[in-house]
Amino acid sequence: MATEPRALLIDLTRCIGCRACVGACQEAHGFPVDDTATELGVRAYTALVDLPQDRHVRKLCMHCVNPSCASVCPVGALRKTAAGPVTYDARICLGCRYCMVACPFDVPRYEYRAAVPSVRKCDFCVDRQAQGQVPACVEACPAEATVFGTRAELLAEAKKRVAENPGQYFDRVYGEREAGGTSVLFLSPVPFEQVGFKAALPTEPLPDITWGVLEKIPGVVSVGGAALFAVWWITHRRQEVAAAEEALHGAH
């Protein structure tokens, strides 16, 4: 039986700005709790922005249905899972940061100051989901401003809320079609550009647009791909050699 992709529905009309989601996310990932984060960071996978008129907007990875970050990653460190999350494997990451350039929502962050840097972003609490738990931000929200479910049922719920309360909501579910659709959906009382969202994104998946251009220059793609693979192989081989040398010295 196919897995129904999971999603989040974040209703800005219900958010009370308590920042419980920010602190819960940090705690769930083993970071020091500082719920004042207003921008995403290597230790802030979600952030909350306070706006005029008592409005509050969450920032986090949108977990695109067809993510451009995964499509540009030359080694598959980022991938979209059938359950919904876009996951990241630091063990095979090259550090090329193409994902940061490709993301239409400006989400990934890089640990520039770390000895062994990696990309950081919301992982949709994939480990919690595997254990049958909801994401930490959902569990912590006292106002049910963030809810968890299948993407299909949350889209239906979002449209129902808009239809039943036309004066309360702007008539659009952000994430239904943006960049080909996302697994994080938003409802807002005002047009989304008024609360800081990118409103002019294409509805076609960005990887489809990218490949539509790249397929016209196959030589560049193949040469570039070969070069990136060579860099990855050299990096991976160095790690293998270092591990072997360490094991050898340890034996003595």
Image (cartoon, rainbow, N blue to C red):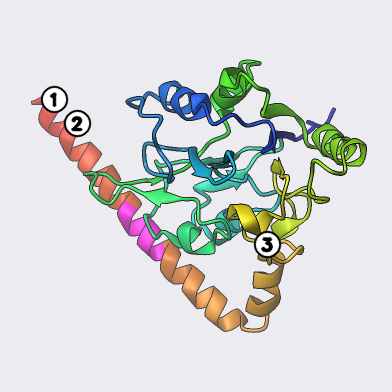
Mark earlier in primary sequence (2, 3):
3
Residue topped by disc 2: 247
Query: Which circle marks residue 29 in the picture?
Result: none
Q: Residue at x 50, y 42 (%)?
A: 50
Looking at the rendered image, the quarter that the N terminus falls into is: top right
Horizontal and vertical percent position of residue 104? 58, 60
Residue type of the residue flagged with mark 1: Ala
Q: How far apart are marks 2 and 3 (CA)?
A: 54 Å
Mark 3 packing: few (<14 Cα in 10 Å), some, or many (20+)?
few
Q: Main secondary structure of the magenta part?
A: helix
Q: Do the residues labelled 2 and 1 touch (CB within 8 Å)?
A: yes
Quarter of image, res 124: top right
Looking at the rendered image, the quarter that the C terminus falls into is: top left
Mark 2 packing: few (<14 Cα in 10 Å), some, or many (20+)?
few
Mark 1 packing: few (<14 Cα in 10 Å), some, or many (20+)?
few
Q: Are marks 2 and 3 in contact (CB under 8 Å)?
A: no
Horizontal and vertical percent position of residue 93? 41, 49
- In the structure shown, which secondary structural element does the residue marked by tag 2 occupy? helix
Query: Which circle marks residue 251 in the picture?
Result: 1
Q: Do the residues labelled 3 and 1 touch (CB within 8 Å)?
A: no
Say whether residue 125 is left or right of residue 210: left
Residue topped by disc 3: 199
Q: Residue at x 13, y 27 (%)?
A: 250
- In the structure shown, which secondary structural element does the residue marked by tag 3 occupy? loop
Horizontal and vertical percent position of residue 74? 50, 59
Mark earlier in primary sequence (3, 1):
3
Residue 248 vs residue 187, the one in the foreground = 187
Quarter of image, res 241: top left
